[in-house]
Image: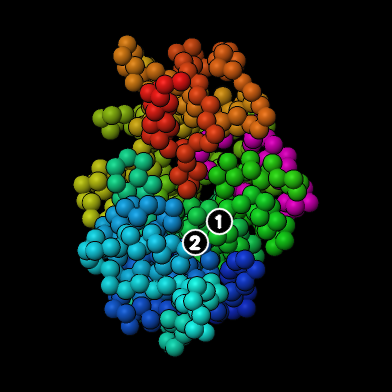
């Protein structure tokens, strides 16, 4: 099925139901939901939203794990003209309060598992706009206590009596449909508002330019797509919606478990998925991982964090399918750049690249004054894409700083080569400055990750009275492995310049990451600072 950038999610749902009604749209924990059933259920839920006072532009929050019921609510909001606000279920009550209050959410869909968090978040007058809470599970109807119906029963009962007829909310491709809150690595999270067009532009651009879809990230109607990243972030919800909009089947994981991911790939014949590099590593380390388990795969997209060449080469060998790297952000809404499968050649320098602009996109690198830099010079990465955000919710100043003349300022430091490939150095805010020299942590991390004893690594700058900052490394060792600081230091000699080599090495059990797999360097710095203050 072709993507049309003038369409909305409501139109895609109606088309899927008409053209392939019995084809499974979602498989979750063994439950199958056809495109016809998904369309009808989301229609009923949309009518129920209207009856609850939810209209065009209303914000509707969802606090729960991924399931077919989550996607019913997303489509219901689209059909009612409302905007879905997914809430990270790992957040504290205070963080949830901020999202509910900042978004002005009027209605909350709530999974019972997170009821205590929601109760604490919405206590008192903290969330004045919130007037309705719909429990997804709901109480048992047999008079007993301490029990719940099957998952989603409360939601189904809420909309069961409503009409299955289509609604016309009067929205178009440029209207808001999704509001995702950033991970909040600096300051309070901001709501990134995305339009319907976000989920149609990339395939439409590939088709319009005549590019071979196989060279990029493509979705086909006969695909079985594994949704392994959380649906409260753009990686999870975006991957689902792109597959949904072509009528594919989405296999949904309520929470990523590597052993379960391997089983699902083999059982359902998964053809395509998107994962973070750490998830690749975990799958490869599973006992049943091998050619037989992964025989159905045609393409794996990966991104959200740096990847070592050794992991890439092992992935090419074991998964036996195409690999494509993604460079994206919530603000971009979609894939900004891609390293195509054809560039995944052992020994190629392009394995270090983030990729080249996807069809329909442009990338430039600028200096501090906004001037475009020539190839090879490091500066701030900027992207122009038709999928970009509408803006930050109720933050015009922040929007104006990030979205300038149609260009998204990504917050990453990098450079373009002569062929237009983008090479990332690091987040601009994560750059370590030692005696005036810029050090990009990702460069050092990539080299340290090649050490056979190192399973995970984060390099950060810590305050230093003499040099301003000093380079420190936090490492997680592989099970049973040992490595002394001097051994790690000597390993880096000749691999990176001497001034980039960490002065200290801290062994941690795990590294803090956000749901997309990105290292939370601020938390790493806090942990290292605490370790230095604690007497041995």
Residue 276's place in the image compared with 134, above or below, is: above
Q: Give how far apart the Cα atoms at labels 2 and 1 are.
A: 7 Å
Element type at mark 2: loop
Q: Which mark is residue 340?
A: none
Mark 2 closeness class: few <14, some 14–19, many ≥20 residues within 10 Å: many
Instruction: Name the quadrant of the N terminus.
Output: bottom right
> Is the residue under label 1 in contact with that under label 2 (CB below 8 Å)?
yes
Q: Which mark is residue 65?
A: 2
Residue 248's place in the image compared with 258, above or below, is: below
455 with respect to 435 (left or right): right
Please report the bounds of the magenta region as a residue range.
291-319
253 with respect to 460 (left or right): right
Rendering quarter of residue 96: bottom left
329 vs 60, nearest the viewer:
60
Decide which of tag 2 and tag 1 comes sooner along the chain.
2
Element type at mark 1: loop
Image spot of residue 386 (x, y percent): 39, 54
- Residue drawn at x 53%, y 36% is 510
Q: Can residue 265 be seen here?
A: no
Residue 135's place in the image compared with 186, above or below, is: below
Report the residue marked by disc 1.
255
20 vs 120, nearest the viewer:
120
């Amino acid at each position: 099925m072709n993507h049309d950038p003038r369409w909305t999610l409501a139109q895609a749902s109606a088309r899927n139901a008409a053209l392939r009604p019995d084809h499974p749209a979602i498989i979750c924990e063994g439950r199958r939901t056809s495109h016809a059933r998904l369309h009808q259920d989301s229609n009923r839920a949309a009518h129920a939203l209207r009856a609850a006072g939810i209209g065009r532009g209303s914000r509707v929050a969802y606090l729960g794990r991924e399931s077919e019921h989550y996607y019913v609510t997303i489509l219901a909001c689209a059909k009612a003209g409302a905007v879905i606000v997914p809430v990270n279920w790992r957040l504290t009550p205070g963080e949830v309060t901020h999202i509910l209050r900042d978004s002005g959410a009027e209605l909350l869909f709530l999974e019972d598992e997170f009821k205590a968090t929601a109760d604490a978040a919405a206590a008192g007058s903290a969330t004045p706009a919130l007037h309705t809470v719909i429990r997804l599970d709901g109480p048992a109807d047999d008079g007993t206590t301490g029990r719940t119906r099957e998952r989603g029963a409360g939601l189904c009962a809420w909309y069961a009596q409503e009409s299955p007829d289509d609604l016309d909310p009067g929205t178009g491709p440029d209207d808001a449909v999704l509001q995702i809150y950033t991970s909040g690595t600096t300051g309070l999270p901001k709501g990134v508002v995305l339009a319907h067009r976000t989920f149609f532009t990339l395939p439409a651009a590939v088709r319009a330019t005549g590019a071979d879809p196989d060279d990029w990230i493509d979705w086909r109607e006969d695909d079985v797509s594994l949704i392994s990243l959380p649906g409260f972030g753009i990686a999870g919800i975006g991957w689902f919606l792109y597959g949904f909009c072509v009528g594919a089947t989405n296999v949904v994981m309520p929470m990523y478990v590597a052993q379960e991911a391997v089983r699902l790939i083999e059982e359902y014949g998964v053809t395509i998925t998107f994962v973070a590099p750490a998830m690749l590593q975990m799958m490869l380390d599973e006992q049943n991982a091998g050619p037989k388990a992964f025989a159905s795969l045609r393409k794996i997209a990966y991104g959200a964090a740096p990847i070592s060449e050794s992991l890439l080469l092992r992935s090419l060998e074991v998964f036996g399918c195409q690999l494509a790297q993604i460079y994206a952000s919530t603000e971009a809404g979609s894939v900004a750049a891609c390293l195509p499968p054809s560039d995944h050649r052992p020994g190629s320098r392009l394995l270090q690249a983030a990729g080249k602009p996807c069809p329909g996109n442009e990338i430039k690198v600028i200096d501090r004054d906004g001037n475009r830099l020539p190839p090879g010079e490091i500066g701030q990465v900027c992207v122009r894409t038709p999928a970009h955000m509408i803006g930050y919710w109720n933050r015009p100043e922040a929007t104006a700083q990030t979205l300038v003349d149609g260009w998204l300022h990504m917050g990453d430091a990098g450079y373009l080569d002569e062929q237009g490939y983008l090479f990332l150095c690091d987040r601009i805010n994560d750059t370590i400055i030692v005696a005036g020299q810029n050090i990009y942590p990702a460069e050092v991390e990539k080299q340290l990750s090649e050490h056979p004893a190192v399973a995970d690594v984060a390099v950060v700058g810590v305050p230093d009275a003499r040099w301003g900052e000093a380079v420190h490394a936090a490492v997680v060792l592989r099970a049973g492995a040992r490595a002394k600081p001097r051994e790690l230091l000597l390993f880096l000699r000749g691999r990176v310049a001497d001034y980039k080599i960490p002065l200290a090495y801290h062994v941690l059990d795990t590294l803090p990451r956000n749901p997309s797999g990105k290292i939370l360097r601020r938390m790493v710095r806090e942990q290292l600072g605490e370790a230095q203050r604690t007497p041995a």
